[in-house]
Image (cartoon, rainbow, N blue to C red):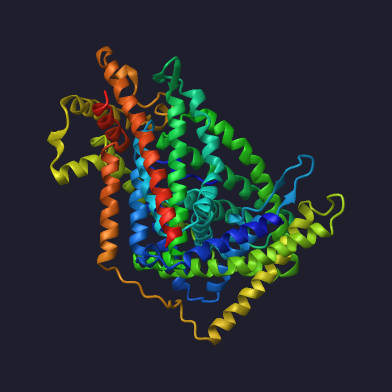
Amino acid sequence: MTSIDGALLDFKRLDQLAEGDTTIHRLDPRAKVLATVVFIVSVISFGKYELTALIPFFLFPMLMVAFGNLPPGYVVKKILLLCPFVLMVGIFNPFIDRVVLVRLGSFGVTGGMISFASIIIRAALTVGISIILVSVTGFTDICRALERMGMPRAFSVQLLFLHRYIFVLAEEGGRISRARQLRSFDGRGLGIKIHGSLLGHFLLRTWLRAERIHMAMLARGFAGQFHSRHEHRFGSREILFLLGWSTLFITFRLHNGSQLLGSILTGIFP
Amino acid sequence: MHMADALLTPAVGVAMWAASAGAIAYCSAKVRRELDDRKTPLMGVLGAFLFAAQMINFTIPATGSSGHLGGGLLLAILLGPHAAFLTIASVLVVQAMLFADGGLLALGCNIFNIGFIPAFVVYPFIYKKLIGNNPGKKRLMIVTMISAIVGLQLGPFSVVLETLFSGISSLPFSTFVLLMQPIHLAIGVIEGLVTVAVISFVSRVRPDILQCALEARPIGARPVRNLVLTFLMAALLAGGIVSWFASKNPDGLEWAIAKATGKEELKGPEQGLHRVLAALQEKTALMPDYSFKMPVEPVKNEMKPENGHKSDNGEKLGTTVSGLLGTLIVLALAYLSGSILNNRKRTL
């Protein structure tokens, strides 16, 4: 019950963040989406045992957070709720892959440990950047950007519709769930039997709602597409943003930034 | 079970993306052509319904845990495969973006595992084949149950395959399968029970909805078969191109950049030799046993001691130390710049 309300609040928070008005927010969504794609592909394309070369990639999310005026605590908290599946699959690496790759004193670091740490860092980077992308762009703008880059219109209408009604229906679902819990004593009525008819009622109500919405939309002249107030333009600022970051990501991908810095310093102070 | 970016390689991710995007394009065209614009709001609102329904839990007796509806099969039964596929795909897009569930590159995999399989494999080949034209209550229940279980066995199995083809996880194939399939047998039974409960409720209260879905032009085997074939071809093509690129050049991206900037000659001879060796290894690894051998044997890498000679052990230690040191410095710099930027914001 509380989790539904919590999830909704979280949801609204993302939408509010996207309302911001910073340099990053004002960029054309397409530039941000494309830069994110280059970022993710560069991060993912590293070998299994890469660790140090991944660290410089944190620069991009951190600068986006700083210039996009996002609350860092919020973003970090969302990243920490990492997809449990990643942990479940990754946790086996240290136990299976026991070849010692590096020795630090008497402690042997095995391949499994390194690849597990690498998986965690990849997850943090990829999850973090998608949260940041949405909170500096907004879901609707991302959809429009994707549509302008060739996503079929039927699918973009579907996405916008879904996004609009998630709030309405999740609130309704929260109310239903709360009502059921308040009427349940000793855990009775929380089982699968009641659940089936509960969901069934909810489904039928949703169905009727869709019919009403359809009539309302027809009355307002819906002809298969939504219109937007904002018009974005892919100008020189966007080109600079996209090219600059892409070049940096590819450089980081080719040269281990941490290693380079470290070897310069160890060269200076032998 | 959502696949995640961190466990994927670009080859697998891009292949599944291409395939899923193709399926979305196909279904969008199909849904548009049907010209039934009543379906537009229905799909949107039912997607939101799926979202809300997944948040309402029920307790599972004797285990103390709770479960919820997945809903892929339910939507396929109510809306037909094309509209259901688009709806599930849209729910997954929202989950990936707003809940960071899985990740953006893994979206292709997730749309395939959770959307394509119930809508275009289970629904036409199992549900539709077994259900007949005028099913009784019992038949409806049993067929729905079987379809749910099959769907939730195929989905996780393809998660296993995608993970293994990527080779980021060290889990061997058999262990992974033994971990995933039994868990999802239980999840499949639960999904079946909920779907049966909802469907039988709807068939009691609004039989017209189900009747409508059943009578809707039966999707012949041909278009679906075509779609499955197209999907396979797209995946093979994209995966083939990317992995050919990756195997021919151990590092496709690096090779492309080297070619573009003409910097190849800057690299040391030892590295060049290593690259040739790595290319050879990758080529042999791309043979049929690609997926099954890779995870068991740790992938050869520059850092693995067996690869280096005894003489360059010291050198290796040196690189490691400088790597660690550099990482620490980068972290410190990042922290510093973060706090400076923060301060600047506060003073502004």
Depth check: give the residue in front, B121 or B99.
B99
Answer yes or no: is residue B158 visible: yes
The residue shown at (49%, 45%) is: B3
Depth check: give the residue in front, B335 or B63.
B335
Residue B288, position as x, y percentages in the image: 36, 31
Quadrant where the C terminus of chain B is found in the figure: bottom left
Q: Is residue A88 shown left or right of residue B208?
A: left
The residue shown at (47%, 48%) is: A127
The residue shown at (67%, 54%) is: A3
Q: Is residue A56 shown left or right of residue B162?
A: left
Answer yes or no: is residue B203 visible: no
For residue A24, above or below residue B162: below
The residue shown at (49%, 24%) is: A96
Residue B123, position as x, y percentages in the image: 56, 55
**Would you identify the image quadrant in which residue B218 lies?**
bottom right
Depth check: give the residue in front, A209 or B32.
A209
* Residue extending furthest toward the right: A185
Q: Is residue A17 shown left or right of residue B206?
A: left
Quadrant where the N terminus of chain B is found in the figure: top right
Residue A252, position as x, y percentages in the image: 29, 42
